Amino acid sequence: MNDLVLRSDCVVTPDGVVACDIGIVGERIVEIGAMGSLTGARLIDLVGRIVMPGGIDPHVHCDWPMPSGDGEAPAMTEPASVVSRAAVHGGTTMMIDFVRCIDGDSVADAIARRDAGWVGACHCDYAFHLMVEGDIAPPMLEQVGAAIGAGHPTVKIFTTDITPSRKGRMVDFGDIWEVFQVIAAQGGLAVIHAEDNDIVMHMYAKLFREGRTAFENMAEVHNALSEDLSFRRVIRLAESVKGTALYMLHTSAATGVAAIREARGRGIPIYGESLHQYMLYNSEDYKKPNGQIFHTYPSLKSPADQAALWGGTLDGSINCVATDELCCTLAQKTRGVRIDDVTGGNAGVEPRVALMYTEMVGRRGYSLQRFVDLVSSNAARIMGMYPRKGAIAVGSDADICVLDPTRRRVITASDLHETDYTPWEGWEAYAWPCLTVLRGKVVMEDGRLTGDVADGRWVSRAIDPAIIAGPVAL
Ligand SMILES: [Zn+2]
Ligand SMILES: [Zn+2]
């Protein structure tokens, strides 16, 4: 007998949307039977609701330093305990954050320290991208290679310092070349924050010279040309190191989408991520009151860029919609007012799944399957954890989100479990999560948290060789 049976006439499986019973024993899905055929210690009737794999957010930053005034210690964003609580309320059961690997520190120690902040302190499952910065010395390369083999197969690289005050993030192309060789040799995946540093820093200098320093001008600094040049340069470099697969973080412009699409057409293993704020807000929104709340780096772009991002979700060049979560208060988010000090990142891990259901299925007529791919399954496929995660299938972890289309609501910060503001204030959601299951345990039911802050577990990952061999159609 099963521990738990979920019954619905609308279950999104890898083989399509079906009516079925999902049988769960312990942490796993052990059988899928015709609707009405399975028995269990607990049976939850979800007829009329949408049963899908738990959301996966492949790009969050918990407990992360934010820009601060001169000489002040940086304020930190909310920790995993807070962000993951919001995540499970919103139907997300897995997040991938980052470990900063700094020269002079051991990568293994950095991972252990980061992990120590999450063990027993996260409501959902989690993993980390390695983040290398600055000059990459040979010992670092060796340690990154070892970490890839130890279940941390994704390596984040910046091609820019982002702002003039953040020197040291950027990795030069010589060192990226070296990192690519390690990633290719170990079967990892390069996760790229690509911007053209020359263009970005030139635009900072130009706008300062012209006295146009207000953050509302951000799209001129972190612009579409920068995305064009940097994406193409990274792609050419990756092409020269056989076995290098790319995942382009926070793609924001039509130029980025085009670069990914063309590279895929040439057979290069490259995948694209965008963010819900890039798809639904544009640079005009910076002019709204507290317009900083819509910002993350690179920047919001034009309506034409938004259209290209949506097009990318249909032609396979944009595969995942993430948040780039940096959960902080409204006061912290709006503290910076200039192009060089505005805080990036976003609050949004809780409404992401419902918002994307609304925009994709509700407003744009996407299939449930495509929507689920974009908010869950593709992240699992690309990031090396499919079908354990991101699938309702026999043998998969029983990570499940249930959306209730009868619970339409207008999003407001006070209903969420994130922080004191939301960039999604006033958006109507056509459905809302009513049940979240993490590895067989009901962790959220009817808006009540039933899980524990110690439920989350680190997930070891290994990239599927097919993802690296060529551009998998997702
Ligand atoms: Zn980034
Ligand atoms: Zn980020």
Image (cartoon, grey):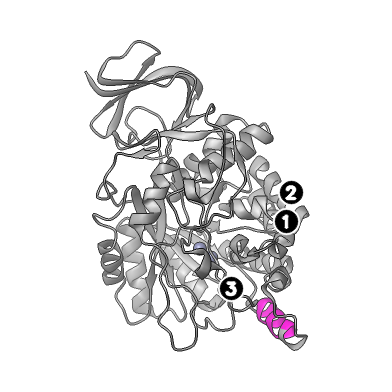
Q: Is residue 437 left or right of residue 173?
A: left
On the image, numbered disc 2 is attached to which residue? 307
**Most distant residue in the front direction:** 414
The answer to whether the residue labelled 2 contacts the one labelled 1, judged by CB atoms less than 8 Å apart, is: yes
Q: Secondary structure at mark 1?
A: helix
For marks 2 and 1 on the same chain, the one whose residue lies earlier in the sequence: 1
Dividing the picture into quadrants, the one containing residue 411 is top right
Does dot 2 land on a helix, a strand or a loop?
Answer: helix
User: Helix or strand or loop: what does disc 3 sit on?
Assistant: loop
| Residue 307 in picture, x, y percent from top left | 74, 48
Residue that label 3 marks: 342
The residue wearing badge 1 is 254
- Which of pointers 1 and 3 lies earlier in the amino acid sequence? 1
Range covered by the magenta-colored residues: 198-207
Is the residue marked by circle 3 packed among few (<14), some (14-19), or many (20+) residues within 10 Å?
many
Q: Between tags 1 and 3, which lies in front?
A: 3
The amino acid pointed to by label 3 is Val
Comparing 450 with 145, the one in front is 450
For the residue marked with disc 2, what is the amino acid? Ala
Please give the name of the residue rendered at 32% of the width and 63% of the height, measured from the top-left corner: 147
Q: Position of residue 174 (x, y in %)?
A: 53, 78
